Amino acid sequence: MQFDTWFGVPRKKIPWYPKIDSAKCIGCGLCVAICGRNVYSYDFADRKSVVIRPYNCLVGCTTCSNLCPSGAIEFPDIGIVKEAIREYGIFKVVKEILKERVEEFVKNAEKYGKD
């Protein structure tokens, strides 16, 4: 599936996903609308957002929590992500990606300037 891995690591090995405190949730639906990975849905009966696909969440992303007007969305400590980066050798994978895309980056630097 589309979000089954994160830099080659099975996504379910990294416990990074949002939780909603329903007592704080005001039902605005902003998290549902802004999440491009369909982590959320909306319960029209309770008028609250709900997490339905937790492992679709991009590891390290906290945009929904940062924008939640009532502070109802929480994530685990960022240390989980940092540990996963170390444990699974993510920097090696990132360096390979950068090597593969070096020509693209050079072209963009030439096209758009180095500012």
Image (cartoon, rainbow, N blue to C red):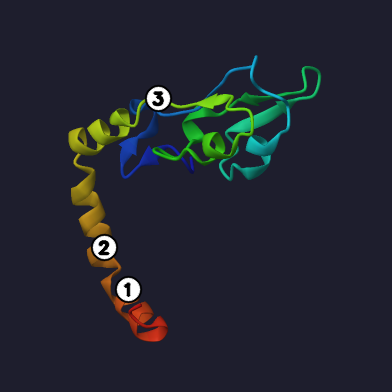
Of all residues, the one furthest to the top in this rendering is 23
Q: Quadrant of residue 27?
A: top right
Q: Amino acid at mark 1?
A: Phe
Q: Position of residue 51 (x, y in %)?
A: 59, 25
Q: Is the C-beta separation of discs 1 and 2 under 8 Å?
A: yes
Of all residues, the one furthest to the right in this rendering is 45
Q: Position of residue 42 (x, y in %)?
A: 72, 28
At mark 1, the secondary structure is: helix
At mark 3, the secondary structure is: loop
> Relative to the observer, which residue lies in front, 62 or 92?
62
The residue lying at 58 percent from left, 45 percent from top is: 36
Residue named by callout 3: 76
Alpha-carbon span between mark 1 and mark 2: 9 Å
Q: Nearer the viewer, mark 2 or mark 3?
A: 3
Q: Position of residue 63 (x, y in %)?
A: 52, 41
Q: Amino acid at mark 2?
A: Leu
Left or right of residue 55, residue 45 in this image? right
At mark 2, the secondary structure is: helix
Q: Which is nearer the N-term, disc 2 or disc 3?
A: 3
Residue named by callout 1: 105
Q: Is the C-beta separation of discs 2 and 3 under 8 Å?
A: no
Left or right of residue 85, residue 31 in this image? right
Q: Position of residue 65 (x, y in %)?
A: 53, 34
Left or right of residue 21, residue 57 in this image? left
The residue lying at 66 percent from left, 23 percent from top is: 25
Residue named by callout 2: 98
Q: Nearer the viewer, mark 1 or mark 3?
A: 3
Residue 14, numbered label: none
